[in-house]
Image (tube, rainbow, N blue to C red):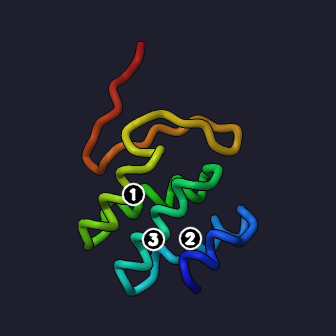
Amino acid sequence: MSRDHLARLPEPERRAAAIEGLQHGSWRVRRTCAQLLDRVDLTPESVAALTRALDDEHPQVRRKAKAGRVYDRELTAGGRKYWVAPPGTVRPRIP
């Protein structure tokens, strides 16, 4: 599927395809999927997929995942609050 084809899909289908595409063998496909996930409404599944992409073997995939809205900040998705940060980062405790 091309990026243009994915971009024309309804948002829920585009999100599902992009989440699945983050497991593709080609880093170019994974990079594009990370970029697409930043352009749809976030869900717990998409946040988890982008968080996993921060550990991708290819630097361009990690860069796209990190450049998105979910990197190093708190967000709300699916009615829940999430805090996403790079691996190894410790969330400060708030009394």
Residue in the picture at 63% in, 79% down: 5
Corner quadrant of residue 18: bottom right
How many other residues sit within 10 Å of disc 1, few (<14), some (14-19) or many (≥20)? Answer: many
| Residue highlighted by disc 1 | 65
| Residue highlighted by disc 2 | 18
C-alpha separation, residue under disc 3 versus residue under disc 2: 8 Å
Corner quadrant of residue 17: bottom right
Q: Nearer the viewer, residue 51 or 93?
A: 51
Q: Nearer the viewer, mark 3 or mark 2?
A: 3
Q: Amino acid at mark 1?
A: Ala
Q: Quadrant of the C terminus?
A: top left
| Residue highlighted by disc 3 | 32
Estimate the x, y position of residue 30 in percent, counting from the top left: 42, 74
**In this picture, residue 49 sits left or right of residue 56:** right
Q: Is residue 86 above or below residue 79?
A: below
How many tags in the picture?
A: 3
C-alpha separation, residue under disc 1 versus residue under disc 3: 10 Å
C-alpha separation, residue under disc 1 versus residue under disc 2: 12 Å
Give the mark nearest the N terminus, 3 or 2.
2
Estimate the x, y position of residue 75 in percent, counting from the top left: 54, 36
**In this picture, residue 47 sits left or right of residue 30:** right
Give the mark nearest the N terminus, 1 or 2.
2
Residue in the picture at 46% in, 64% down: 34
**In this picture, residue 24 sits left or right of residue 14:** left
Q: Is residue 3 above or below residue 53?
A: below
Estimate the x, y position of residue 33 in percent, counting from the top left: 49, 69
